[in-house]
Image (tube, rainbow, N blue to C red):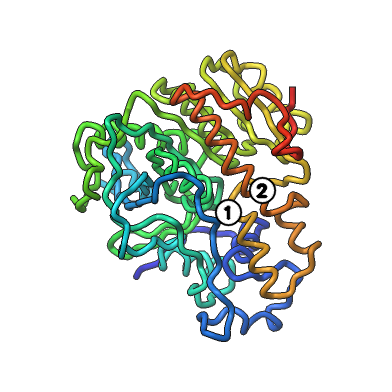
Amino acid sequence: MTTTSVTTRTDMTRRRILAATLITGLGATVPLGAASGAWAAPTASGPARLTLPAPTGPYPVGTVPLHLIDTSRPDPAAGPGHHRELMAGVWYPACNTENLPRSPWMTDGALRALLTDVGFPLDPALGPLTAGHMGAPVHRTSHPLPVIVYSHGARSHRSDHTIMVQELASHGYAVVTVDHTYDTFTEFPDGRVLTPADFPPMFPRDFAADLRFLLDCVEQLAAGRNPDVDGKPLPRGLLGALDPQRIGAFGWSKGGTATALTMLADRRVRAGLSIDGPMQPTITADLDRPFMMMTAVFTRAAMPDVAEFWTHLRGWRLDIQADGAVHNSYGDDATLIPQAGKILGMTDQQIQDWIGTLDPARAVRIQQAYPLAFFDQHLRHRIRHLLDGPSPAFPEVKFIR
């Protein structure tokens, strides 16, 4: 395995510390020496592997990685003759999953690179497994699957919102996730591992360009063509299973901004969801399709850019905010960090510093329920009254008018 890191930063940013906390359980105020033995490989008497909540839909979930190259975009950072190279994943409703292994949350190489980057090269054996069964056949019906593409945040990775991704797949969506190369931890099939870089810089428009290329790949899959550059066999039933006429998009942080930019540039995306996106640089173009915001820190009240973007939403729009939520509340962090904290004896305050005061179990239910309701309503035309206004089932969720 070859690990390539072109980052020049020596300081550990809050996001990098958070990544270490998520995987190793090391809180910012937990001494390394006190925790150094806590994350050896799991044994009968040692700590158990971290877990993700099971999705609630009627279908088991399948997943497969894709190795993609966008030949329309040269990549000078990779050298002459190279083009934009990406790793992606497809998640979908599956059948016949018995005896098929579950996919790890991150590949071993990417996870090890994450740990090394944050300064804690510990055994990643406790990384969680997902609900996705590797290579499972697709559950086919008389209708092709609506599609949702996902964009992660800065210095993150495509697994960061697996709870949402596998939830949507369990309810009959195909979800395509992507690692934004040079701003992510990613591993390629030949063993190369790339980590977040300062050069080349990755801006929201670069993320949006990746998403538009991902839409092209969705169209290839829908037409029965395999976009994987290595010709890797795809799960049975995946070719021809996707509906290119029903595509949505969502993203977290920088990925939320990229979702908006993608919709402005490409009408193939019919509905978009931003999870606490800062909407920077300022967006001043009008958007005429459904858009929903789940805000926490980057609110309209706190961020002029978000407030400005809101005024340009000319179609169906919604802004919700959960009491006690912070930037990392709507994602896998909400459940993984408390588990790690419990093992290491972190205080409630230390955990809340990372994920806010929103109860982790409630955070999970919110991120399972609201994105599903949004995409059901706007891609499947299934009216979800959860989006009409405050719900007794979710008293902590406020509708920001």
Image quadrant holding the N terminus, namely: bottom left
Label whose residue precedes the other's in the sequence (1 or 2): 1
Indicate the secondary structure of the residue bearing disc 1. loop
Residue under the image location 58 percent in, 73 percent down:
120
Q: Is residue 203 above or below residue 186?
A: above
Any part of residue 201 in sight: no
Tell which tag, 1 or 2, sits nearer the viewer.
Answer: 2
Q: Is residue 386 above or below residue 187?
A: above
Residue under the image location 21 percent in, 31 percent down:
223
Q: Is residue 105 left or right of residue 280?
A: left
User: Identity of the amino acid at label 2?
Assistant: Ala
**Quadrant of residue 280 in the image?**
top right
Label disc, if present, on residue 41 of the rendered structure: none
Expressed as whole percent of the image width and height from the top left, the position of residue 194 reads: 42, 59
Q: CA distance from mark 1 to mark 2?
A: 10 Å
Indicate the secondary structure of the residue bearing disc 2. helix
Expressed as whole percent of the image width and height from the top left, the position of residue 236 reads: 21, 48
Q: Is residue 10 above or below residue 132?
A: below
From the image, tell me which residue sits under label 2: 363
Image quadrant holding the C terminus, namely: top right
Expressed as whole percent of the image width and height from the top left, the position of residue 132 reads: 40, 55
Viewer-proximal residue, 201 or 24? Answer: 24
**Quadrant of residue 24 in the image?**
bottom right
- Disc 1, disc 2: CB below 8 Å? no
Residue under the image location 53 percent in, 75 percent down:
121
Q: Is residue 143 left or right of residue 51?
A: left
Label disc, if present, on residue 332 of the rendered structure: 1
